[in-house]
Structures are given as C-alpha cells and as structure tokens.
C-alpha cells in the first residue's frame, strides 16, 4: 500500500512541475542608437516578426515556456543606414521572463561602408 502512495506522490509532484513550467513568458530587451527608419526583428524559431520604431527603447516577444528563441535582424534601419548588433539573441525560455537581449545600432558611412565617426574630414588627393 505504501508503494501506491509513493507512485501517487510522484505523479502529483511531476504534475505540479509541469503546471509551473507551462504558460507564456516575455522575451525582450533594450535598444540603443536606433535613428531614422524602423528596424525589423524576427524570431527564427517561431517566425514572429516585430517592427521597432526609433522612439522605442525596449521590445518584447511572447513565447510559451520551454521553447527556444533566436532573435535576428530581418531588415536594418536605412534612413540613415545603420548597423545593429544583438547580444544574448538566443536561448531557451524557462518559467521566467528574459529581458537581457541588447540591440545597439550605429550609423554606417554609406560611401566607404564603415561606421561613421565624427572627426576631421579625410584628406582627398585631387590630382
């Protein structure tokens, strides 16, 4: 008879653990340096697409607990042209919200294809 109670207790504990892990979890973070036009993000695991506007400082996706996420840039901002880098872009959602995905954007020099940094103008040989 004690063996039956042990199996029942095990089933109850497993059921509680599964119930706690179910539900929706928010995955997101912060954006810095976005200017001009919108930035499009995509989660490659779920197919969710999100449009981020320059005045936004935060973003978030919603996932079911226990699923994977992999956030990437679908379309970079282009007015002005910017390069955006994502840190902590992938993982597995547990029962807690994820808020440590950081996106940093910087303006790209359209003529030379590098980052634009203010400073003296480059010397150009006109001969």
Image (cartoon, rainbow, N blue to C red):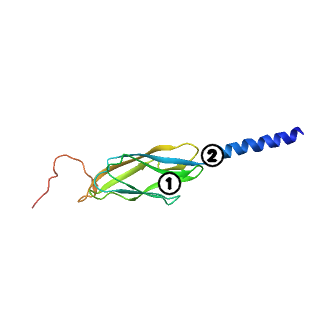
Task: Specify the farthest residue to the top.
Answer: 2
- Residue 88 percent coordinates (x, y): 47, 47
- Mark sitting on residue 9: none
Name the side, left or right, on which 117 lies relative to 8: left
* Pointer 2 residue: 21
The residue closer to the viewer here, 73 or 99, is 99
Q: Is residue 42 above or below residue 32?
A: below
SS of the residue under disc 1: strand
Q: Residue furthest right?
A: 1
Identify the mark nearer the N-term, 2 or 1.
Answer: 2
- Residue drawn at (66%, 46%), measured in percent from left and top? 19
Mark 2 falls on what kind of element? helix
Where's residue 111, x and y in %? 23, 59
Identify the residue shown where x is 54% and y is 52%.
63
To which quarter of the image does residue 5 belong?
top right
Where does the image place residue 65, in percent across and percent down from the top left?
A: 58, 49
Place of residue 25 in the rendered image (x, y in percent of width and height, measured from the top left): 54, 47
Q: Residue at the location (24% across, 48% down)? A: 117
Q: Which mark is residue 70?
A: 1
Q: Are marks 2 and 1 in contact (CB under 8 Å)?
A: no
Question: Left of 126 or right of it: where is 78?
Answer: right
Quadrant where the image shows the N terminus: top right
Nearest to viewer (mark 2 / mark 1): 2
Rendered view: 42 above or below 9:
below
Crowding near the residue tagged with mark 1, few <14, some 14–19, many ≥20 C-alpha atoms within 10 Å: some
Distance, label 2 to label 1, CA atoms, is 20 Å
The image quadrant where one finds the C terminus is bottom left
Pointer 2: residues within 10 angstroms few (<14), some, or many (20+)? some
Q: Nearer the viewer, residue 77 or 120?
A: 77
């Amino acid at each position: 008879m004690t063996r039956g109670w042990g199996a029942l207790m095990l089933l109850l504990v497993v059921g509680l653990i599964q119930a706690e892990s179910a539900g929706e979890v928010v995955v997101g973070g912060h954006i810095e340096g976005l200017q001009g036009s919108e930035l499009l993000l995509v989660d490659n695991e779920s197919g969710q697409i999100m449009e981020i506007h320059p005045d936004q400082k935060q973003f978030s996706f919603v996932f079911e607990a226990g699923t994977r996420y992999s956030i990437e840039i679908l379309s970079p901002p282009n007015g002005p042209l910017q390069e955006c880098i994502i840190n902590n872009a992938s993982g597995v959602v547990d029962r807690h919200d994820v808020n440590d995905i950081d996106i940093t954007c910087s303006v790209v020099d359209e003529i030379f294809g590098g980052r634009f940094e203010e400073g003296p103008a480059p010397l150009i040989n006109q001969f």
